[in-house]
Image (tube, grey):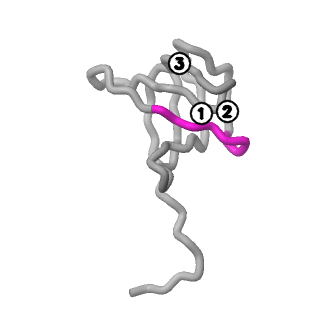
Amino acid sequence: HLQSGKQSEPATKSVAGKVTSIGNSGTSFVLEVEGSSKQTMEFTVSKNTQVQGQVKVGTLVAVDYQPTEGGQNLAVSIAVRS
């Protein structure tokens, strides 16, 4: 077993889809995942989240995110796709 002094960073995953709702003054949003049968995912947004473009309901975006221990998905970066 390799011993490491620090916690390993959670793997960053990415998903694309359409923003269906934005909640809590922009600190969370729900995405309808592209290419799936209406599957939705909720993401939390932190002050460290990088946002490229104007994100609003109906916008197509690509999201890089990290699953957190609390079962949430923390958005690392959000990029609007035209």
Q: Which residue is labeled 1 in the image?
A: 78
Q: How crowded is mark 2: few (under 14 residues within 10 Å), some or many (20 or more)?
A: some
Q: Which amino acid does label 1 sit on?
A: Ile
Closest to the observer, 47 or 52? 47
In the rendered structure, does residue 55 fall within the stretch colored magenta? no
Q: In percent of the image, x 55 and y 44: which residue is there?
A: 74
- First in sequence, mark 2 or 1: give its number: 2
Q: Earlier in the sequence, mark 1 or mark 3?
A: 3
Task: Name the residue type under label 3.
Answer: Ser
Would you say the magenta stretch is mainly helix, strand or loop?
strand
Q: Position of residue 68 (x, y in %)?
A: 50, 52
- Secondary element under disc 2, as helix, strand or loop, is strand
Residue at left offset 55%, top offset 71%? 7
Q: Earlier in the sequence, mark 3 or mark 2?
A: 3
Instruction: Reply above or below: 70 against 7.
Output: above
Q: Give the range drawn in magenta.
A: 42-49
Direction top: furthest residue: 58
**Percent from the top left, x then y, of residue 71?**
44, 48
Residue 33 bears which disc, if any?
Answer: none
Mark 2 touching mark 1, by CB under 8 A?
yes
Residue identifier under label 2: 51
Q: How many angstroms separate mark 3 from mark 2 (CA)?
A: 16 Å
User: Residue at position x 59%, y 24% from top?
Assistant: 23
